[in-house]
Image: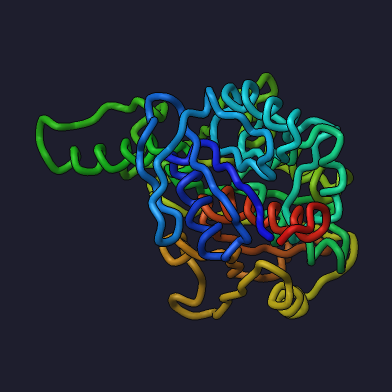
Amino acid sequence: MGYRIAVVGATGNVGREMLNILAERQFPVDEIVALASRRSLGTEVSFGDKTLKTKDLDGFDFTGWDIALFAVGSEATKQYAPKAAKVGCVVIDNSSLYRYDSEVPLIVPEVNADAIVGYAKKNIIANPNCSTAQLVVALKPLHDRARIKRVVVSTYQSVSGAGKEGIDELWDQTKGMYVPGQEVAPSKFTKQIAFNVIPHIDIFMEDGQTKEEWKMVAETKKILDKSIKVTATCVRVPVFVGHSEAVNIEFEDHLDEDEARDILREAPGVLVVDKREDGGYVTPVECVGDYATFISRIRQDPTIENGLNLWCVSDNLRKGAALNAVQIADVLGQRVLKKG
């Protein structure tokens, strides 16, 4: 016996990936529906070897459906997620709306799967920010061994994190650079993204952080350990898919780089590619379409007593969004709903 699954926002980048991953992982589905806004009504999307026509989210009745994977913005989630949850459909939400709600668990299954029991308070589970998801997957096994005191992370985030508009703007600006008179002015981003980097994701806050940086701090603490000090600089780069992070970690106890490498090799969701030679590391282009969080460049930080540096890369549309949501659904099914 399988589940009745609704994918909300099925025509977007993340929604399409959710459908792909549900099919790839052979999630036990009895019935599936693709939901979108009225302007996308009837748009065809793929689910394995099937083609689904999207239905109107606004008029949809979630009664009798088991799980709804939400891949729409916070405003639409605010309107429709409580309706689904109220009639017994468990919502797994990819927006930022519920991430900081104390009554909603924020889950990365490799890190804090046990926290899923808290879903019953609102019948909603939150998916973390894409940059946070891959970071905590890397940090968790190291924290278990040597207790992390402080993390300094600089991100190199692809334009797909800003949706289809971000992808289109990079593509159009890149083409326009080679065709005189067809230059494309910034629209989605605050400055030119083609052949450039922008140290600004989301809005600026009063203390000088951007909200993306604040999210990484708040979410890492909620998912992993509230005592860890985190500081982040988040940068948009001209890459279509795949987020990268340069991570500096200070531990309470000494952790040798060789032991850290061995720990990460055994960690769930992690693949270590770390050779000290040309090409002995993973870049965003190589991670696209993969489930793993890739770790490279593991080395001691000689400037502090118990420090390590590492390089972390993941497909942000997968582990950073769609894959993590489906993994949450897996845990929910195995531990709570128990139909599959």
Who is closer to the viewer here, 281 or 172? 172
Q: Position of residue 232 (x, y in %)?
A: 66, 42
Q: Is residue 22 left or right of residue 270?
A: left
In which quadrant will I find the C terminus? bottom right
State left or right for residue 73 relative to residue 125: left
Q: Vertical placement of 8 versus 302: above or below?
A: above
Q: Is residue 14 above or below residue 142?
A: above
Q: Residue at x 86, y 34 (%)?
A: 121
**x then y, percent, for residue 217:** 73, 40
Picture coordinates of residue 266, whole percent (x, y): 73, 77
Question: Visible in this render: residue 62?
Answer: yes
Q: Is residue 176 left or right of residue 12?
A: left
Rendered image quadrant of residue 305: bottom right
Determine the residue positioned at 53% across, 50% down: 18
Name the residue at 41% across, 56% down.
Answer: 50
* Residue sitting farthest toward the left: 180
Please indicate whether residue 198 sits to the left or right of residue 233 in the image.
Answer: left
Nearer-the-camera pick, 114 or 27: 27
Say if 189 sits above or below 112 in the image.
Answer: above
Determine if residue 128 is in view.
no
Looking at the rendered structure, the number of numbered marks drawn on it comes to 0
